[in-house]
Amino acid sequence: MQGMMMHRPLRIIDILRHAAEAFPDQGLVSARDEGDIHRAAYPEILGRVAQLARALRDMGIGPGDRVATLAWNGHRHFELYYATAGIGAVCHTLNPRLPAEQLAYIMQHAGDAALFIDPSLVALAEGLADGMPAGLRCVVMTDPARMPATALAAACYEELLAPHAADYDWPELPEESAAGLCYTSGTTGHPKGALYSQRSTVLHAMSVPLSQTRSFVAGRRVLPVVPMFHVNAWGLPYTAPLTGMTLVMPGKALDGASLYALMERESVYSGWGVPTVWANLLDEIDRRGRPPAGFADLVVGGAAMPRAMTDAYEDHGITVSQAWGMTEMSPIGTNGVVPPVLQGAPRDAQMAVKTSAGRRNFGLEFKIVDDDGTPLPHDGQATGELHVRGNTVIAAYFRNDAATRAAFDAEGWFGTGDVASIDATGRLVIRDRAKDLVKSGGEWISSIDLENAALAHPGIRACAVIAIPHPRWDERPILVAVAEAGARPSLEEVHARMAPHFARWQLPDDLVLVDELPLTATGKVSKLTLRDRFADYTLPDLREGGA
Ligand code: AMP
């Protein structure tokens, strides 16, 4: 028997319409490219989104057309998210930290019809001009007075909006329509596109606050340090208006001092970003002796947050929760919120949750499988590749059959490439990226576990473990580290800290100190680059005369 309820399509624009009605005093605070601070409440932003939608239609942009952005976190970028979705077009966020060659490839592959650019990224766009799709329309996101001189035939954003009325009769769209496009470049080969729908985006926005309960409080302020070009800033441009929060948009200045100043001035309650960002902020907190006033909730993802850093923030009274996810998952898959049964428990018991990748959000299914694809028990011990499925997981890569065939198992689950264990309470522990594990003498060594142990050494500021080929053992781990100012950590000291937690053969063979670690375009340590840099490196026991 069929239920007898209405079926109304889920639409992204309805999130903003809801915010404008239910939370008219909340909105966006943006540190803009032009150097000023812009403030607008959701009703005003909805009006500008309507103007922009009319402008896009005037430019000939319609349903299914890809509109690219080269922009930091700010209100105009937010307006583009909603105006494109509102008319059924697709917002395609480009990561300005990618090499020009990859950006050109991505734009060609996506077949972008327009490109909206922040003033500080105009020079980057000019450098891409030859690689851009034919007929691409460029718009610089500023007002006429601050329009930069450019070789691009570019229109001015505020001039485009100005003539248009601030209302729009938003069309009914099939909820499966594409709304967002983001390429992931964490792998070798060409970047691959995840094409989000209206439905997947709204479901993601509704499910994340259900699990990440502490972070969403109507009337408070949330700071996405995670860029809007990296998986829609983890969905915050949707979850914040939906839950009545004000978004504090940091623009391009993401160093510790700038973030601290912005958070302090704007009373940010919750901040979201990758560990490298939180390491920089922690330096600033140490310098000033206290965290920014009002900062109470920190969500970290993209890579594991080391225990030492988690402790440091918790000591300052800031609740840390780790989320795990992927571009292919919209992106959030888990939450690290401490469950009621552990609230009030000693910190060590809570840390078992906080230092894990958390527990799965409602609507997602997880399984771990061995090399043959056989499911393994969720007993906290068995370790295998994590496979996922759910309404917010990609069903295929955009225009890439080969990558799609490689990514899904026979039952249609998506293979994440992460090697993990899951315990009986659903706690997910990411042991490694499959490609980052070190295989020594037929046994696997987790680079993440070694890195976390090494970071407990007070003289180590940042580090990465990589595998070096070895004729006898296949591979051996080495630790590449950045020392704290004035410190000179030794391999013996690091071994001493690791010894209680690892077998002897699992310890790194060498410690190499470097000035800095290479980062990927999304702010994670780039092991790919590091492995390239160490291509000619010789392990101590293979050096002439041995070690
Ligand atoms: P991206 O698609 O760029 O968001 O990268 C996704 C990958 O980042 C995942 O497959 C993981 O390898 C890694 N990742 C994301 N969140 C975490 C986390 N909390 N802990 C460990 N690794 C993570």
Image: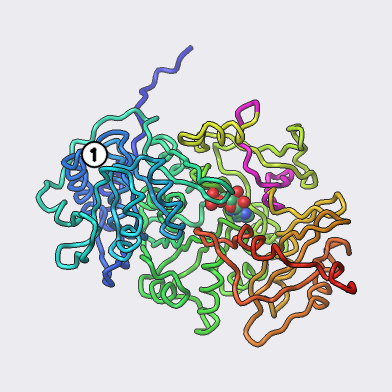
Our reading of the magenta stretch's main secondary structure is strand
**In terms of image quadrants, where is residue 123?**
bottom left
Tell me the magenta residue range. Answer: 410-433
Would residue 339 be visible to someone looking at this image? no
The answer to whether residue 258 is above or below residue 6 is below
- Display coloring: rainbow
Front position in the image: 160 or 109? 109
Q: Position of residue 231 (x, y in %)?
A: 46, 49
Q: Position of residue 359 (x, y in %)?
A: 63, 47
Quarter occupied by the C terminus: bottom right
Residue at the bottom extreme of this rendering: 486
Residue at the left extreme of this rendering: 163
Q: What is the three-letter code of the residue carrying label 1?
A: Ile
The answer to whether residue 266 is above or below residue 56 is below
Residue that carries the numbered disc 1 in the rendered image: 61
Total numbered labels placed on residues in the image? 1
**Residue at (16, 41) in percent of width and height:** 58
